[in-house]
Image (cartoon, helix red, strand yellow):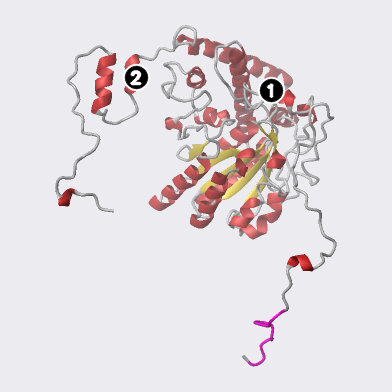
Amino acid sequence: MEGSPQIVGRSHAFKRAGELPLKDPLPMVLCVPSAPHRPGDTPHFAPLATSSASELERPDTLAPFETLRLHAVGLIRVLGTDDLAAGEWNPRLSPQQLRSGLEVMLRTRHFDTRMITMQRQGRLSFYVTSSGEEAVSVGAATAYLHDDLLFPSYRQPGLLLVRGMPALTMMCQGIGNVGDNASGRQMPVHYSWRAGNVVSISSPVGTQLPQAVGAAMAFAYRGERRVVGSWIGDGTAAQGDFHHALNFASVYRPPCVLHVVDNQWAISTHRTMATGGTSFAARADAYGFPGLRVDGNDFLAVHAAEVWAIERARRGGGPTLIELVTYRRDAHSTSDDPSQYRADNEADHWPGGDPIDRLRRHLVALGEWSEESHRQLNAAIEQELNATFQIAESYGTHANGLGHANESLFEHVYADVPAHLAAQRAELMGEPTAKPHEEPAILPFSEAANRAVG
């Protein structure tokens, strides 16, 4: 075409790469990230943020994702170093709402303490604690409606406590006795609460994220204005399920809020092995929806970010990815020894503080709480949960039997029990049965019309 630049199709002399000298060649070195400190080192965390709590603006919930890129690499905070709330993200919760949040966080921590103690005494087989991450679950759960569907991971017992799951049922689930609403069919800490719209935790990490996106797609397809929330850890963000979920969320724009809880460690693997990027929230930008990076130990900030993302989803704005920056204070589980891979007293150097202590100080600064009130609440919750565990053990223990009837082995598996299982159940119960009709293993094809095709 006349006037077009003559660069397309122009032939060039070809030389193999080996024949061309490289200008300032980089060394061929494989980068293997490592933790910033190991046993014997002095812990040194970088500051979580250099900005003030009020610096990031709170945009409209339907704002284009391109305008939120700073929110994915910055840090949304509400509580300042003066223990007061500031900035556009301040959710302006009432003192009663703040006290309720503090109480559930305290209950979550005492629940963990009681269950860990019982596991160390051999009265539980396994446990996973959420100490230091209470605001991640409690601050989020208080923002959802009861009809919204939640897909938690291991460290969100606060979600279930906010939803109303009795601590007694959760303790029985940990023991696996007859009081377990899952009938002893799940590992400990794999809670589910149908009445509270909380889907069962699954052992393979990450599977809940695409499941959550699929549930949100179903809600949108049926025209239901319900929102789905799902949580994974930073290590799981390196799994394929994470990217599959984000891709489906990107394409179909269902009403869901996806979370990466960045608690610094995935068992003994530091977060640096899970991403080479600036943040986990920044990954949302490649998929075309907003990412928010939030101070996960700031109860008010977690709640505010959750409210924003839920409102966006309910208005038809699609998904949001929230990264919650927090710290796992205890071992990964009761089967883990963090002294083998973490520096001594690492938790004491974490710059994000403790979520319970930060909310306590905020309430004290408002004149809505006191040290004596805090002491009394701590003592009351501890006494309550100690008594609750004694009741849980009355339903059955590992030492004296879990209380499940033998025939329960055949329950809650099939809607209609197949003949061969019915026969096995009858045999177990010592009941006379007719021999079930058995089909031959290989069906003969005697006529051409009966032959398999394809």
Q: Nearer the viewer, residue 237 or 308?
A: 237
* Picture quadrant of residue 43: top right
Query: Could you tell me what secondary structure mostly forms the magenta stretch?
Result: loop
Q: Nearer the viewer, residue 112 or 22?
A: 22
User: With 380 as the anchor, is 276 left or right in this view?
Assistant: right
Residue 450: x %, y % from top left: 17, 48
Q: Is the N terminus in the top left, top right, bottom left or bottom right quadrant?
A: bottom right
User: Residue drawn at (21%, 39%), measured in percent from left and top?
Assistant: 443
- Give the residues in magenta: 2-12
Residue 389: x %, y % from top left: 53, 13
Rendered view: 126 above or below 121: below
Tell me the residue that label 2 is attached to.
408
Mark 2: few, some, or many residues within 10 Å (few <14, many ≥20)?
few
User: Residue drawn at (43%, 17%), measured in percent from left and top?
Assistant: 179
Mark 1: few, some, or many residues within 10 Å (few <14, many ≥20)?
some
Tell me the residue that label 1 is attached to.
337
